[in-house]
Image (spheres, rainbow, N blue to C red):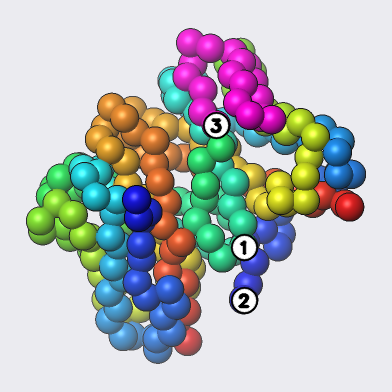
């Protein structure tokens, strides 16, 4: 079946602008995760959804970052007033549920803030 | 485009040789560990996992070893192939089900 998909694959924006990044998890997966990966580093956790609710948002760096998953499937990561330091690859992963928690990753969205 | 792993430690091996990639993890309470492979421009891909009640697990051409005493994981790849060239990350899952990734290692396979 289809894996995790993310759109857009690349996003270039100007400092101060608002961006939305989309994640389509594997069908039937109830758990969804967002990670951020800077060049030369491993992914860093941002937020985890179980169903529609954010079960853990402890990784969001500040209140400019927000994510939603209104119907328990597609998720959108929203970044307000982007800064150059937000430039990174944003990865989404999904797992069947908390118990069957092998996480499958999407290809990521590369965000560049000029 | 840019490549993940430009500034990472690199392991260079001859095709056909065995590779060993090491990783230290941080939380002694973690009970689930995973190795991921990441190719340029792609997301991490699951290779093999191990739970803390085990010290060794084997897959196809890969073996993971876990030493809880020193909080150390290793990934062994047998008969390394050119397609194994990538960046490899270990990750631990904490009590809230999020993955904490270690620093990666770039594996280069020489033909």
Q: Which residues are magenta?
A: B48-67
The residue labelled by disc 2 is: B1
Disc number placed over residue B48 in the picture, else none:
3
Q: Residue B9 location in percent, x, y?
A: 75, 49
Ranked by sequence position, the earlier of labels 3 and 2 is 2
Residue sitting at 31 percent across and 70 percent down? A21
Whole-number angstrom distance, CA of label 1 to CA of label 2: 9 Å
Residue neighbourhood size for the residue with mark 2, other residues' Cα within 10 Å, grouped as few (<14), some (14–19), many (≥20)? few
Where disc 2 sits, the SS reads: loop
* Residue A40 visible to the viewer: no
Residues marked 3 and 2 touching at CB (< 8 Å): no
Ranked by sequence position, the earlier of labels 1 and 2 is 2
**Side of B67 relative to A8 (left or right):** right
B25 up-or-down from B46: above or below: above
* Pointers 3 and 2 within a single chain: yes
Disc number placed over residue B95 in the picture, else none:
none
Q: Nearer the viewer, residue B59 or A63?
A: B59
Residue sitting at 49 percent across and 16 percent down? B52
Disc number placed over residue B40 in the picture, else none:
1
Q: Residue A5 location in percent, x, y?
A: 36, 62
Q: Nearer the viewer, residue A35 or B56?
A: B56
Whole-number angstrom distance, CA of label 1 to CA of label 3: 20 Å
């Amino acid at each position: 079946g289809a894996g995790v998909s993310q759109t857009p694959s690349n996003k270039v924006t100007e400092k101060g602008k608002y961006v939305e990044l989309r994640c389509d998890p594997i069908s039937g997966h109830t758990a969804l995760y967002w990670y951020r990966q800077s060049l030369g580093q491993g992914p860093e956790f941002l937020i985890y959804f179980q169903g529609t609710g954010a079960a853990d948002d402890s990784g969001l760096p500040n209140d400019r970052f927000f994510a939603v998953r209104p119907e328990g499937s597609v998720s959108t990561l929203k970044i307000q007033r982007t800064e150059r330091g937000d430039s990174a690859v944003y990865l989404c992963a999904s797992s069947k549920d908390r118990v069957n928690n092998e996480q499958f990753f999407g290809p990521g969205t590369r965000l560049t803030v000029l | 485009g840019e490549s993940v792993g430009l500034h990472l430690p690199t392991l260079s091996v001859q095709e056909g040789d065995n590779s060993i990639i090491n990783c230290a993890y941080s939380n002694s309470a973690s009970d689930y560990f995973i190795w991921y492979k990441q190719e340029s421009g792609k997301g991490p891909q699951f290779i093999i996992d191990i739970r803390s009640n085990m010290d060794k697990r084997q897959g196809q051409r890969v073996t993971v070893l876990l030493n809880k005493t020193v909080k150390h994981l290793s990934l062994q790849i047998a008969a390394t192939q050119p397609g194994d060239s990538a960046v490899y990350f270990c990750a631990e899952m904490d009590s809230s089900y999020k993955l904490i990734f270690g620093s990666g290692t770039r594996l280069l396979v020489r033909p």
